[in-house]
Amino acid sequence: MNAALQPTIRAYGVDLTPVLAIDLPQLRTWRNSPDIAAQMLDQRQISPEAQQLWFSRISNDASQQHFVIRYKDQPVGACNLKQPDGEAITGSAILESGFYLADPRFRGSMLAFFPALALNQYCFQTLGCTTLLAHVKLDNQAALRFNQQLGYQMTQQISQPTPDGQVLLQQMQLDLSGFTQAASRFARFAG
């Protein structure tokens, strides 16, 4: 979806702004950092050319939306939504989310939950989605716990091909009830 048509999501004290061309160098730096890349299915370094091709592809793809996470106007990470079957996000019952905090000061803090809650709220309340999926590498215990605290339930394990071979992922699922319960637990911390 064209970034100009995507909304900026403001909730829980954070802004999720659509990825623009000006954001690409920062996103590439983050994504190529060893701690972020280690959690990705494709861990290869991303060149400026490869990133530009990715940006051109996603800019007109109605099946995904990508955001920069901003806290107090400072970029601190990235998140995205995808429709698993390649259909348009708008009007889709099932969406998949992805998320990372690049700024290590916020990992493991209460702030880490706010961008995810903002994205989940957008999915359930604005887009009308009924089910959110997340796929987490089995060795990423922090992300598994993080998603469980957000109300996700483990559903099944999936083997996913990657450039480095097969990787086992834990599929997790969130519905409106799980989101509502998690959001109420975190609301008092969001101010």
Image (spheres, grey):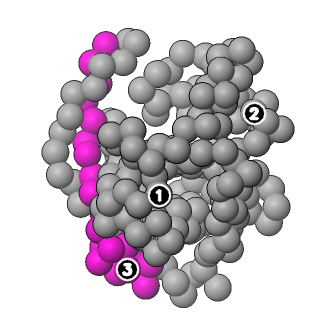
The amino acid marked with disc number 1 is: Thr
User: Tags 3 and 2 in contact by the CB under 8 Å rule?
Assistant: no
User: How far apart are labels 1 and 3 at the CA level?
Assistant: 21 Å
The amino acid marked with disc number 2 is: Leu
Asked if residue 92 can be seen in this view, the reply is: yes
Question: Looking at the image, is 136 positioned above or below residue 16?
Answer: above
Q: Residue at x 83, y 38 (%)?
A: 22
Q: Residue at x 34, y 81 (%)?
A: 181
Residue 90's mark?
Answer: 1
Q: Which residue is label 2 attached to? A: 24
User: How far apart are labels 2 and 1 at the CA level?
Assistant: 25 Å
The amino acid marked with disc number 3 is: Thr
Question: What is the crowding at mark 3: few (fewer than 14 residues within 10 Å), some, or many (at least 20)?
Answer: some
Question: What is the crowding at mark 2: few (fewer than 14 residues within 10 Å), some, or many (at least 20)?
Answer: some
Residue 145: percent from the left, percent from the top? 35, 56
Of pointers 1 and 3, the one earlier in the residue sequence: 1
Mark 3, secondary structure of its residue? helix
Question: Looking at the image, is 4 positioned above or below residue 180?
Answer: above
Camera-side mark, 1 or 3: 1
Of pointers 3 and 2, the one earlier in the residue sequence: 2
Question: Is residue 158 left or right of 8 when viewed as pictured?
Answer: left
Asked if residue 32 can be seen in this view, the reply is: no
Question: Is residue 156 left or right of 19 when viewed as pictured?
Answer: left
Residue range (magenta): 165-184
Residue 180's mark?
Answer: 3
Mark 2, secondary structure of its residue? helix
Number of numbered callouts drawn: 3
